[in-house]
Image (cartoon, rainbow, N blue to C red):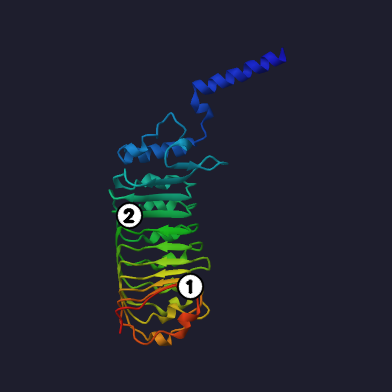
Amino acid sequence: MDLKLSTLLCLTLLFSTILNPALSELCNPKDKKVLLQIKKAFNNPYILSSWKPKRDCCDWYSVTCDSTTNRVNSFTLFSGGLSGQIPPQVGDLPYLELLQFHKQPNLTGPVQPSIAKLKSLKLLRLSWTNISGSVADFLSQLKNLTFLELSFNNLTGSIPSSLSQLPNLEVLHLDRNKLTGPIPKSFGEFHGSFSALYLSHNQLSGKIPTSLAKLDVSTIDFSRNKLEGDASMLFGLNKTTQIVDLSRNLLEFDLSKVKFSKSLTSLDLNHNKIAGSIPVGLTQGDLQYLNVSYNR
């Protein structure tokens, strides 16, 4: 009798689950509501056609949920399908760790201010879009951020010095925009885990701050700007930097007096006003690529 009763209960539960999928849904209802609001704000694009109210949002395209809490922790949309501005509702996904809008040419407007509420965010990529306005100072509030990419956009204005206050930041991409003004002096103060700085293809001007002598990272790319003066502080015998691209600027210093580390694998200094001879030290390390053409 107990076996029959147990079997009956199991069958009842099974059929109830089949008839009412909501009973087996993992997605948090608050997260689902927010995602549906985001879909509506984007005018229900085809790319989000799998976002149906009766389906578990953890199974929706471009959405990932945490395996333990079942809260939405990743929202990623690549290669077209969106238009308009980033909806403010993205800031209402409190457990979001990854937010990526990449190759969305019809995405416009500023960097959405509500993103500042995403205190768990570790990776933010808004790239290859038509986002405009400034590099928002509020991004420095995202203390868990390790990767920030705002490249290939239409961002203007100066770079906020507060970005160097991000304690866990490892990679910063601000390349391929229309940014102006100097490189912030505070960029010599990034924390120990910081490893790559990309500022190329902008309209940055002025001298490279001497404070960047303290910067020891794997990659530096300041190419295609209007930077002037000395850049020798970026190098040093004890640095671990591997790739440096300073090409197509207005830099002017004596290359023969610069001390290079053996870790350097790629150095591009073409189209500047650099003088002097190539130091012997450059031939004694791991250098694989060197371009010093179109200098003095």
- Which of 23 and 49 lies nearest the eye of the viewer? 49
Task: Look at discs 1 and 2 and give the one toward the viewer.
Answer: 1
Q: Quadrant of the N terminus?
A: top right
Q: Quadrant of the C terminus?
A: bottom left
Q: Report x, y in % for residue 259.
A: 47, 83
174 relative to 105, above or below: below
Q: Residues within 10 Å of mark 2 (few under 14, many from 20)?
A: many
- Which of 91 and 202 lies nearest the eye of the viewer? 202
Provide the secondary structure element on which disc 2 rests.
Answer: strand
Residue at the spot x=60%, y=18% of the render?
11
Provide the secondary structure element on which disc 1 rests.
Answer: loop
Callout 1 amino acid? Thr
Numbered mark located on residue 41 in the image: none
On the image, numbered disc 2 is attached to which residue? 128
Callout 2 amino acid? Trp
213 relative to 30, above or below: below
Q: Gap in Å between the C-alphas at discs 1 and 2? A: 27 Å
Q: Report x, y in % for residue 232.
A: 41, 81
On the image, numbered disc 1 is attached to which residue? 241
Count of marks, rendered view: 2
